[in-house]
Image: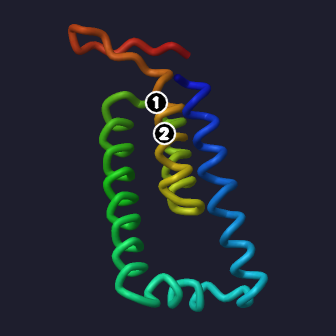
Amino acid sequence: MRFVFLILAIWGAVHPMYFFVQWFLAEGWSLFALVDAWRANLASTGLTWDIVISAVVLIIWILSEVAITRNLRSLWAIVATICIGVSCGLPLYLYLRDRVVYARDGSINRNL
């Protein structure tokens, strides 16, 4: 599954970024205009909030697991989530998280 998660993280970075770059080329390189576009109508506003809430949940999940597992590499998924989006951050986190395996008795085995 690690390979699948890695491929999904790459896809989640490249595919949305293609559309952002196309939008910036057509509309100009203004982040304020991009945020305004996210609030252009009720549907896009709802989708924006859905993604923001998902990003907050993912960041909280990552921080809570890193506090237990000390798998500090997983923190890169927070950077990816903030800079790229949940479509990259979530599969990247699952890819990085898969290195830590939980035993049945609750102990943590690190496959590093």
Q: Residues within 10 Å of mark 2 (few under 14, many from 20)?
A: many
Q: Quadrant of the C terminus?
A: top right
Q: Nearer the viewer, residue 92 or 110?
A: 92
- The label on residue 32 is none
Say if mark 1 contacts mark 2, CB within 8 Å.
yes
Say above or below: 19 vs 81.
below
Residue 72 position within the rendered picture, expressed as x and y whole percent measured from the top left: 49, 36
* Residue 70 in which image quadrant: top left
Residue 31 position within the rendered picture, expressed as x and y whole percent measured from the top left: 61, 84
Q: CA distance from mark 1 to mark 2?
A: 6 Å
Say above or below: 110 vs 52.
above
Say above or below: 24 vs 108.
below
- The label on residue 97 is 1
Residue appearing at x 59%, y 51% in the figure: 12
Identified by mark 1, the residue type is Arg
Q: Nearer the viewer, residue 45 or 106?
A: 45
Residue 43 position within the rendered picture, expressed as x and y whole percent measured from the top left: 38, 79
The residue wearing badge 2 is 93
